[in-house]
Amino acid sequence: MPPGPSGPGSGSRRRGPRTIVALGVAGAVLASTGVAAAGGGVVDRPVAAPAPNTAGVADDPETPGGPDTDAAAGTAADEVAARVVAALARDLDTGFEALYEAYRGAVFSTALRLCGRWAEAEDLSAEAFLRAYRALCGYGPDRIAELRPRAWLLTILTNVWRNGLRSAARRPPPGPPIEDAPDLPDPGEGVEDAAARHETGRELAGLLAELPHAQRAAVVLRHVTDLPVAEISAVLGVPEGTVKSHISRGLARLRRLRAGHDPG
């Protein structure tokens, strides 16, 4: 159950960051699968979203949904970011709760597609938010005012994921892959649609796992998380041209993999 609102007259005790993250693990899973969770918050694209359209995707990796779609999404994202930054400026703890509610779905969805494992995605998401809180404790008003929260959180998440890759040999075997993870239903979804969605999620997980890490991150951030190329550049710390190259090469390889013609 995700945390509810707190503040004067709410009757809720103020929660620390670990409590917010711990209570919100189930909520993050619900949010990222498109199921509305108690307590509200922004519900992001489902985890089992359709795979990138490798058969007819736009040649320009910057505009998979078209300029009008991107403009509308950008405006909504800017409004959410402004509310989160304003909340952080007023009070760190309540602001962090707003940050978590707004972006938990996007963070979990991205983590799940990056690592392909349900339990590992939960751990990556929790670690990213805890690191974010520690960083915010050292931020002054000016730095908070300049914060781009979504890109900032995904930068932290991507760094946590990369660090995990480097130490993978020293870690215990991971949990079950995404295809064996619980599949939460959409209340309005028919049996056939649910089966198709689950199968698409399994296929996407397998295809993404075949991509080099840089290409996988770029494709996930662009075509699953819907970040514009400029934000992906900031998240990955590489030039925009490199981002576009990673996306184009990643999509090309996904096409070959789906057709069964990838040489490896």
Image (tube, rainbow, N blue to C red):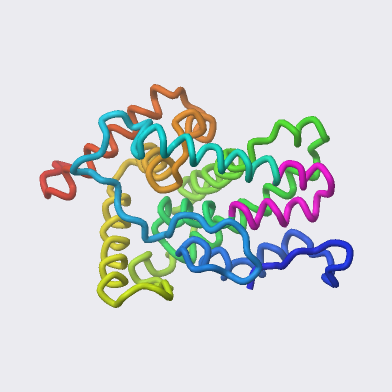
Count numbered badges in the picture: 0
- The picture places residue 149, in percent across and down from the top left corner, at 64, 41
Which quadrant holds residue 118?
bottom left
Which quadrant holds residue 59?
top left
Is 175 displayed left or right of 199 in the figure?
A: right
Please name the residue shown 50% across and 48% down the image. Answer: 161
- The picture places residue 116, in percent across and down from the top left corner, at 39, 58
Please name the residue shown 64% across and 36% down the image. Answer: 148
- The picture places residue 121, in percent across and down from the top left corner, at 49, 59
Q: Residue furthest right?
A: 8
Is 245 displayed left or right of 233 in the figure?
A: left
Please name the residue shown 73% across and 43% down the image. Answer: 135
Nearest the eye: 137 or 161: 137
Nearest the eye: 191 or 253: 191
Magenta region, mostly helix, strand or loop? helix
Is residue 245 inside the magenta stretch?
A: no
Quarter of the figure that contains the N terminus: bottom right
Q: Which residues are magenta?
A: 84-103
- The picture places residue 45, in percent across and down from the top left corner, at 45, 55
Please name the residue shown 36% across and 41% down the image. Answer: 219
Would residue 182 be seen by someone viewing this image from the given angle? no
Q: Is residue 129 above or below residue 150?
A: below
Would residue 40 be seen by someone viewing this image from the given angle? yes
Q: Is residue 109 above or below residue 240?
A: below
Nearest the eye: 43 or 255: 43
